[in-house]
Image: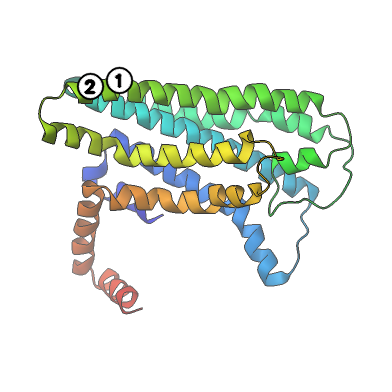
């Protein structure tokens, strides 16, 4: 939320890269809210039950947000490709309309494509148990306890889910970075190469972190990897927490914008007192 507010408040961050970063921040906040709130409530109340409809809604929203995040990161990879490979045409290519269209496509496509999954998931007539071997509702543990025919659901998950939401974004992102690396290699000065690589280092770190976690969570069979809940928790809690830290700690623009907003905050009496209480705490 801090990073999202910083992007909205500071005019120096009103660029395509930070526009997509703001969308990524929204996705991270929503994904943690839709999954971790039930865990926290169960710690407080001791109630580990969840309504069937609420469980289905949680599966749909989290799955859709995962798809949205992958496509937003793909759009950010394309943004870095244009910035490094076509710097003189960057403002023309990545204009406000194009950025808005790309972001809208990521959100709409991510939520609409998962409707077919939910259609087949709702058609499951019975489950072998009412206990989910997981800390939240997810597609894989629900399929494992289903006792009706799930052939179409598994086929859809292995084709559309794997191809559309993992392989295609990965190939598009990889293609962007192939052209980026080719361009960086052609830069003669070492300082120019370091600067070009620095502009996409944060995005590359987030990409590697997310795809590695998703690979361990969904692509490796259960008989090979038994601790999938650990990777699922890492994907739902740790990765969204690390994303803003990676982009803020490794980014000079974000740190400069934060200093400017702190300076403005000191001029405001209420904000200054609030800041003083936070620092004192």
Pick whichever, 52 or 86, lies toward us. 86
- Picture quadrant where residue 118 is located: top right
Badge 2 local density, few (<14 within 10 Å), some, or many (20+)? some
Residue 239 coordinates in the image, percent (x, y)? 48, 49
Seen at 83% across and 42% down, the residue is 145
What scheme was used to colour the molecule? rainbow
Q: Quadrant of residue 280?
A: bottom left
Q: Is residue 4 visible?
A: no
Which residue is nearer to you in this view: 208 or 150? 208
Q: Nearer the viewer, residue 189 or 143?
A: 189
In the rendered image, the residue lying farthest to the left is: 189
In the image, residue 256 above or below residue 202: below
Q: Which residue is mark 1?
A: 179
Residue 166 appears at what percent x and percent y? 54, 28
Q: Which residue is mark 2?
A: 183
Report the residue that reaches farthest toward the front.
224
Q: Nearer the viewer, residue 75 or 166?
A: 166
Tell me whether the residue at label 2 lies in contact with that at label 1, contact meaning CB atoms closer than 8 angstroms.
yes
Left or right: 176 in relation to 168 = left
Q: SS at mark 2?
A: helix
Please say if 212 is above or below 255: above
SS label for mark 1: helix
């Amino acid at each position: 939320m801090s990073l999202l507010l910083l992007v909205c408040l500071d005019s120096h961050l009103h660029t395509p890269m930070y526009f997509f970063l703001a969308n990524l921040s929204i996705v991270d906040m929503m994904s943690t809210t839709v999954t971790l709130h039930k865990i926290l409530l169960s710690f407080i109340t001791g109630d580990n039950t969840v309504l069937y409809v609420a469980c289905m809604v949680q599966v749909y929203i989290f799955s859709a947000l995962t798809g949205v995040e992958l496509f937003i990161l793909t759009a950010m990879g394309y943004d870095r490709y244009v910035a490094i490979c076509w710097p003189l045409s960057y403002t023309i290519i990545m204009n406000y309309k194009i950025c808005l269209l790309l972001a809208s496509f990521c959100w709409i496509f991510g939520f609409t494509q998962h409707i077919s999954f939910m259609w087949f998931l709702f058609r499951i007539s019975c489950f072998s148990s009412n206990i989910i071997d997981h800390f939240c509702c997810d597609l894989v543990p629900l399929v494992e306890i289903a006792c009706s025919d799930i052939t179409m659901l598994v086929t859809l998950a292995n084709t559309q889910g794997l191809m559309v939401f993992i392989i295609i974004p990965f190939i598009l992102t990889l293609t962007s970075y192939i052209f980026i690396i080719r361009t960086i290699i052609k830069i003669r000065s070492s300082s120019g190469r370091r600067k070009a690589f620095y502009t996409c280092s944060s995005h590359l770190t987030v990409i590697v972190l997310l795809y590695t976690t998703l690979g361990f969570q969904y692509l490796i069979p259960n008989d090979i990897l038994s601790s999938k809940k650990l990777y699922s928790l890492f994907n739902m809690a740790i990765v969204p927490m690390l994303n803003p830290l990676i982009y803020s700690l490794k980014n000079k623009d974000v740190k400069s914008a934060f200093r400017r907003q702190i300076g403005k905050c000191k001029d405001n009496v209420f904000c200054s007192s609030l800041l003083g209480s936070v620092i004192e705490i």
